[in-house]
């Protein structure tokens, strides 16, 4: 019987199987328990012979059970260790997937460059009243200049005399800033603007940066120096040449459109030199009527303003040629032209990132 029990113990393949053998041997109605019970019915001589054998058998079976249990537990642990592994040597993803959009990057570069010249950053709403977007800028109703910009008009709200518009330029921020901060002031105002226009070089939403300086005895020389200093810092070249052409904006007098010289480098047109010209911004001396509209005395305060397309600045510096791709959200484009989050532009480190 002892051999049969020992065989069953070593044949048990799982802990529950082994426990079943233990119950069959040592449980209440187990075989060895029954043997122990039979001792009571024996005469003294027989018991003296049988008792040590039965106790020895119980020892042997208990020992075998315990050894088998340890063996099964060790095997189970080994199996878990072999199968439940975490490979800590897996490579991390090769790059962080998010990038900073070139428009955001250029806005940061502009803020950095103009901060050095003492300009703060100002903001205004994208949904504007016609007063701020047009009238205060010397474009009264029925003024032909309103037709120069293809305006998106909103449905008038109940009780609203005049429909609001999606701002067509960042110039309304000029008015809001003068009203709020008075004079003197120096700000740039980057942001989104909207016009009903769409082709390879126009999108219904695009970005502009407005510049405004109001102070005493400001003249066009200040404007020209500021633009030259800005464009040299932005394009990181000393050979930036500007050409100012007389132009017309209702809110500046005189007004000038500013061209920047380009030249051919390795078959590409790049900013710098003066083989040809391209227009980069509109500018002028703030119209006295605009200054008066903001509650300032135009005899005391003068200033200059300029407005410049940010998307175009980005294209010229970083070499994209289709404006529409800026707003497609194509992950391949963003990966290629986007900037790493830590490429913060600084004047000392190079605004080019
Ligand atoms: N707001 C004008 C435009 O969008 C640009 C501009 C701004 C011109 C400031 C002169 C002064 O075309």
Image (cartoon, rainbow, N blue to C red):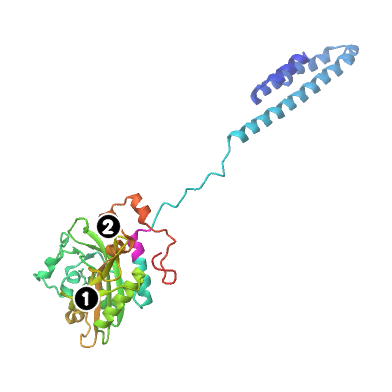
Packing grade of label 1 (10 A; few <14, some 14-19, many >=20) is: some
- Is 149 situated left or right of 84 in this image? left
* Residue 52 rendering spot, x and y as whole percentages: 86, 18
5, above or below 213, in the image: above
271, above or below 203, in the image: below
* Residue 30 rendering spot, x and y as whole percentages: 72, 17
Mark 2 touches mark 1? (CB < 8 Å): no
Magenta span of residues: 100-106
User: Marks 2 and 1, Cα distance to the nearest angstrom?
Assistant: 25 Å
| Residue at image point 24% right, 79% down | 304
Q: Mark 2 points at which residue?
A: 321
Packing grade of label 2 (10 A; few <14, some 14-19, many >=20) is: few
* Residue 24 rendering spot, x and y as whole percentages: 70, 18
Q: In which quarter of the image is the C terminus?
A: bottom left
Of 352 and 89, nearer the camera is 352
| Residue at image point 64% right, 30% down | 76
Query: Quick check: can you spot residue 110?
Result: no
Q: Mark 1 points at which residue?
A: 244
Q: Quadrant of the N terminus?
A: top right
Number of disc labels: 2
- Ligand 1, by image quadrant, is bottom left
254 within the magenta span: no
1, above or below 110, in the image: above
- Is 329 situated left or right of 248 in this image? right
Q: In which quarter of the image is residue 279?
A: bottom left
Q: What element carries label 2?
A: loop
Does mark 2 have its CB less than 8 Å from ligand 1?
no
Q: Is mark 1 on a helix, strand or loop?
A: strand
- Is 88 situated left or right of 225 in this image? right
């Amino acid at each position: 019987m002892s051999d049969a029990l020992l065989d069953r113990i070593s044949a048990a393949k799982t802990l529950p199987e082994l426990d079943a053998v233990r119950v069959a041997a040592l449980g209440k109605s187990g075989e060895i328990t029954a043997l122990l019970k039979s001792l009571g019915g024996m005469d003294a001589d027989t018991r003296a012979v049988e008792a040590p054998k039965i106790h020895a058998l119980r020892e042997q079976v208990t020992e075998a059970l315990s050894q088998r249990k340890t063996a099964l537990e060790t095997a189970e642990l080994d199996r878990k260790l072999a199968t439940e592994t975490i490979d800590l040597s897996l490579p991390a993803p090769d790059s962080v997937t998010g990038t900073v959009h070139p428009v955001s990057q250029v806005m940061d570069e502009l803020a950095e460059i103009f901060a050095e010249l003492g300009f703060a950053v100002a903001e205004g709403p994208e949904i504007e009243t016609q007063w701020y977007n047009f009238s205060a800028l010397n474009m009264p109703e029925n003024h032909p200049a309103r037709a120069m910009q293809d305006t998106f008009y909103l449905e008038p709200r109940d009780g609203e005399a005049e429909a609001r518009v999606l701002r067509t330029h960042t110039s309304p921020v000029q008015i809001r800033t003068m009203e709020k901060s008075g004079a003197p002031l120096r700000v740039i105002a980057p942001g989104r603007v909207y016009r009903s226009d769409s082709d390879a070089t126009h999108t219904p939403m695009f970005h502009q940066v407005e510049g405004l300086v109001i102070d005493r005895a400001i003249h066009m020389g200040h404007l020209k120096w500021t633009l030259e200093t800005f464009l040299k810092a932005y394009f990181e070249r000393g050979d930036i040449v500007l050409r100012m052409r007389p132009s017309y904006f209702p809110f500046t007098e005189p007004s000038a459109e500013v061209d920047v010289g380009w030249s051919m480098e390795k078959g590409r047109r790049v900013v710098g030199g003066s083989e040809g010209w391209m227009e980069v911004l509109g500018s002028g001396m703030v119209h006295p009527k605009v200054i008066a509209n903001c509650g300032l005395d135009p005899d005391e305060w003068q200033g200059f303003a300029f407005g410049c397309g940010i998307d175009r600045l980005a294209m010229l510096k970083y070499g994209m040629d289709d404006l529409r791709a800026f707003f497609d959200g194509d992950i391949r484009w963003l990966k290629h032209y986007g900037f790493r989050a830590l490429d913060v532009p600084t004047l000392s480190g190079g605004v080019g990132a």
